Image: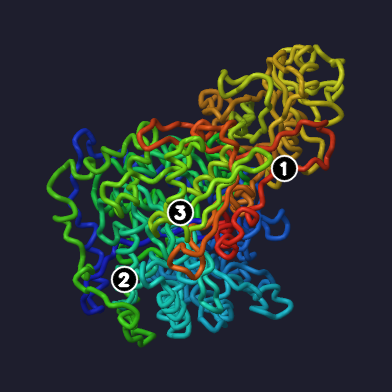
Amino acid sequence: MSEAGGGRGWGFAVPQRAPWSLVAATAALCLVSATSVWPAGAAPMSREEKQKLGNQVLEMFDHAYGNYMEHAYPADELMPLTCRGRVRGQEPSRGDVDDALGKFSLTLIDSLDTLVVLNKTKEFEDAVRKVLRDVNLDNDVVVSVFETNIRVLGGLLGGHSLALMLKEKGERMQWYNDELLQMAKQLGYRLLPAFNTTSGLPYPRINLKFGIRKPEARTGTETDTCTACAGTLILEFAALSRFTGATIFEEYARKALDFLWEKRQRSSNLVGVTINIHTGDWVRKDSGVGAGIDSYYEYLLKAYVLLGDDSFLERFNTHYDAIMRYISQPPLLLDVHIHKPMLNARTWMDALLAFFPGLQVLKGDIRPAIETHEMLYQVIKKHNFLPEAFTIDFRVHWAQHPLRPEFAESTYFLYKATGDPYYLEVGKTLIENLNKYARVPCGFAAMKDVRTGSHEDRMDSFFLAEMFKYLYLLFADKEDIIFDIEDYIFTTEAHLLPLWLSTTKQSVTKKNTTSEYTELDDSNFDWTCPNTQILFPNDPLYAQSIREPLKNVVDKSCPRGIIRVREESFRSGAKPPLRARDFMATNPEHLEILKKMGVSLIHLKDGRVQLVQHAIQAASSIDAEDGLRFMQEMIELSSQQQKEQQLPPRAVQIVSHPFFGRVVLTAGPAQFGLDLSKHKETRGFVASSKPYNGCSELTNPEAVVGKIALIQRGQCMFAEKARNIQNAGAIGGIVIDDNEGSSSDTAPLFQMAGDGKDTDDIKIPMLFLFSKEGSIILDAVREYEEVEVLLSDKAKDRDPEMENEEQPSSENDSPNQSNEQITSSSQDMDLAEQASPEESALNPPPEPVGSSSPAEMDNAANISPPEQNSDPTEHHESTSLDGECTDSDNQPQEPSETEEDSNPNVSWGRKVQPIDSILADWNEDIEAFEMMEKDEL
């Protein structure tokens, strides 16, 4: 989904352009009739193995859902590491992520129709009774309109749809009398005040009890919303109207979609990420298919399926043509600028775009779906999960993974479309990784860092609403599901709405307004189901032939070779433009190219070199754009040079009973001692040093000899502590912060620096833990005395033999132990906090606001003196077009501490050069691009 959490989904239906009384009967035939062919070497999976994997999915759901009901209900979500519920206001704020929580038992409502899909009808009936008995929607809490719509309103409507189905079957729910629908209607009316704007676009947040703008509402002052937030309402609101006969809901959702369509950029037919809800001005002018826009496109196509309005399909096809023309660079999907769509807006992709191959399947465009899906799968095979964001050369940009379901969703639809057993093997890999790396005693924990394997105390509701639904359906045969899934369409949160709603009396009479805005070529649009003989030729190697060139794209081939060089499309035969990584200030040819691009080189008194671009001085508009891109790359290169010397985070993994490797703590590295990335990990039992601060000769050397010493931060240098425990015979050291309450949730990890002297004498590994993470080890020592840990560069696989021998079932853990079986505390999922100041400031926009040409733009950037750094490639991790790719990840910056570590007021912030002093003439677009790193993922 587009903000805090996960989801998008759809059913199989692609309707014909036919009388809508026939749609429900014919639409479901469009995808599932694909010829089932298997590539050579990939035999079809046996019925027994598929059944085994399906049963495994059921057990995993039981583990997640059962622990939520036991440890968290009626709270909104489960905190799986600490085995308790997450209640809004009782836990530290996570920013916008918490806007999904409304004290309405979110996970239970989000899971209702999943229970039926998984044939747990008794549990479904019990869950419905609990919702009707316990859930209150009249809460004084500010929630996201978008999240509440797709998760809660969608969950209630999906539950109502399947309750009707079960009642009609006569097996269960005979007592049901539309109670969930009445709750949905009540919630719908509580959301309506958000639409009280001149544009018809809703406010992003609303108070469930007091609405908007009232003093007690504490909301209503916002001016901006994301495109997906305003454009992902039509399915739920229209279904509510058609279920109840109250037309107002569909009318409001249609008005918002109409406004977004009218405000699209007319020359590119793209929409931006963020829009002003009062004026309709685009606040962020970058455009892609990921966070902030994703489900807007999805709902245009699905609104056509469900509501039978041709204008929705016309709009979708218009946007899709623009996406494939500008954003799609197979297998990549890169954001561009809506006014200059040939110009990339950023050099990384977010995980939410993983839904797009599935949408392309629904559209009937299979080849690019296969290509992008395969690229994403290669990233997953490298990191076990899909990072929240990764660069175009497939390095980690944001390392979290909150157990998002989008990739599983696309895997399911590609399997339904192709019948290729390859996608069953992909699904099997997803199941194995979830059990191996994310499963904890009280559920499944989100990944805090896919590189180290550390966890977050978080299990979002969309994990139960979507992930298990798609994985189960992937391996299920038709007879395994108690109803015909093809009679329903999936919402973006994978809730089920019946296709027969399209045959109900249309609650809104709406003329086709699309042609008022653009002249459409009807011949380009697919009005009927895709022809499977064209999509899937009678060639068993069809899908495999598309995947084959991409199977090593992440590890062995340089992705820059796949990306089309846009400049060459403008100037046939011309050389590619000068790239920042290749620039040498002493090369006369390079200086001449700079001059042609309108870039001047100025030598400053302090020895630095400043680059300034005056686009109006460029030889042509093409050269001006090349100069603009060069300036962007130079700023990013400067930022990368600052980060280059930073070490990646390390992992402390508790491997003794009863943890068995489930507990992984993110640790800060040291600039001295044994480098865990180059040497084998260190494993041993822990022991506290005396004195605990480790600032003098240890008085208990017999206790720490051969063990990993625990030391408190403070009163002396880190290197001195390391020498003292090393002299006592310790094989490693863990420094625990003395600032009570500190946590990697709220502070960036930092690396321990030396004391300014030669530290080659320190041979043992040293790691740093904040207080909250350190207390997990200290609590374990108090409880179990003998605690063994593993110090490594990233988490290692668990020891299943030891686990099976000493602890046969993780589900049978004693409740008394649950609070001990935890890992590192959750890191705020508000990705605005994830982005470093450098990343936010050093991604300037390549175009001025309100101008279609770069003629009025001035840019400036400072770089190192040429005599100190004549070849910038030495300080950049990316490679040239014909170079070899590096395999290292883009690591987060960690400040060093070189003074005495006892000072609790030491700033952990990172120094950055103010961007406004560099790019003074870009003020308006700079603000927009500073928001780019704050995608509401």
Q: Looking at the image, which residue sits at the far left?
A: 538
Sequence-wise first label, 3 or 1: 3
Residue at position x 64%, y 57% in the image: 916
Asked which secondary structure carries label 3, the reply is: helix
Residue 176 position, x and y percent, is: 47, 73
Picture disc at residue 305: 2
Q: CA distance from mark 2 to mark 1?
A: 48 Å
Question: Front-most of 598 and 843?
Answer: 598
Residue 346 position, x and y percent, is: 47, 52
**Can residue 351 be seen?**
no
Picture disc at residue 534: none
Vertical placement of residue 669 versus 855, above or below: above
Check disc 3 and give the amino acid type. Answer: Leu
* Residue 775 located left or right of residue 313: right
Q: CA distance from mark 3 to mark 1?
A: 27 Å
* Residue 314 located left or right of residue 91: left
Check disc 2 and give the amino acid type. Answer: Val
Residue 48 position, x and y percent, is: 30, 39
- Circle 3 crowding by C-alpha within 10 Å: few under 14, some 14–19, many from 20: many
Check disc 1 and give the amino acid type. Answer: Ser
* Residue position for label 3: 352
